[in-house]
Amino acid sequence: MNVLNFIAENWDIIAVILVLVTGVLLRLRALWKGDVVEWLVAICADAETLYGDGTGYLKLRYVYNAFLATFPVLSKYISFDTFSQWVDIALDKLKAKLSANEKLNNVVKPVLGGIKNE
C-alpha cells in the first residue's frame, strides 16, 4: 500500500523522469544507429567479398553474428527487423561508395561483378 501512496503523491515527478529517460534512450539509439550503420558498411563489404553473389542468407548471418559480437549490449535492445533495415541502409551506402570510388570498386568487382553506374 505504501508504494501506491508514493506513486499517487509523486506521479508528476515520476512522469517527468520517465519522459526524460525515454528521450535520452531514443537519442542514444539514434546516435548508435549512425555509428552502427557506418560499421555495417565495412562488414557488408567483407561479407560480399567472402561469400560473393547469390548468398544473401549467409552474408546476413555473417553480418548479424559480427554485430552480436561487437555490440552485445545494443543487440539486446535492437530487433532483428530493425537490424535488417540498418543493413539495407548500409548496403545502399556501400553501393554508392563503390560507384564513386573506382579503386574500391575494383577490389570488390571480381566478387560482385562491380556496381554499374545507372
Image (cartoon, grey):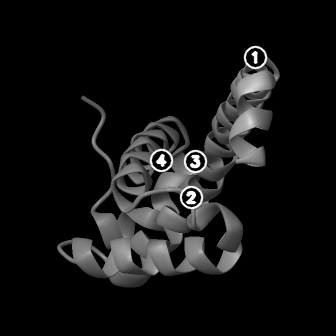
Label 1 or label 4, whichever lies nearer to me, is 1
Which numbered disc flags the more N-terminal residue, 2 or 3? Answer: 3
Task: Please determine whether, in this image, residue 33 is positioned above or below residue 117.
Answer: below
Q: Which mark is residue 77?
A: 2
Residue that appears at 48% across and 60% down: 106
Look at the picture and state if 65 lies above or below 43: below
Mark linked to residue 20: none
Q: Which residue is mark 4?
A: 90
Picture coordinates of residue 85 (x, y %)? 37, 46
Q: Amino acid at mark 2?
A: Tyr
Packing grade of label 1 (10 A; few <14, some 14-19, many >=20) is: few
Q: CA distance from mark 1 to mark 3?
A: 37 Å
Dot 1 amino acid type? Asp
Do the CB atoms of the residues marked 3 and 4 lie less than 8 Å apart? Answer: yes
Distance between the Cα atoms at labels 2 and 4?
A: 19 Å
Three-letter amino acid code of the residue under disc 3 = Val
Measure the alpha-carbon separation of dots 2 and 3.
16 Å
Q: Kindly state the secondary structure of the residue where label 4 is placed.
A: helix
Q: Earlier in the sequence, mark 1 or mark 4?
A: 1
Three-letter amino acid code at the position of disc 4? Ala
Q: Position of residue 97 (x, y in %)?
A: 52, 41
Q: Which mark is residue 12?
A: 1
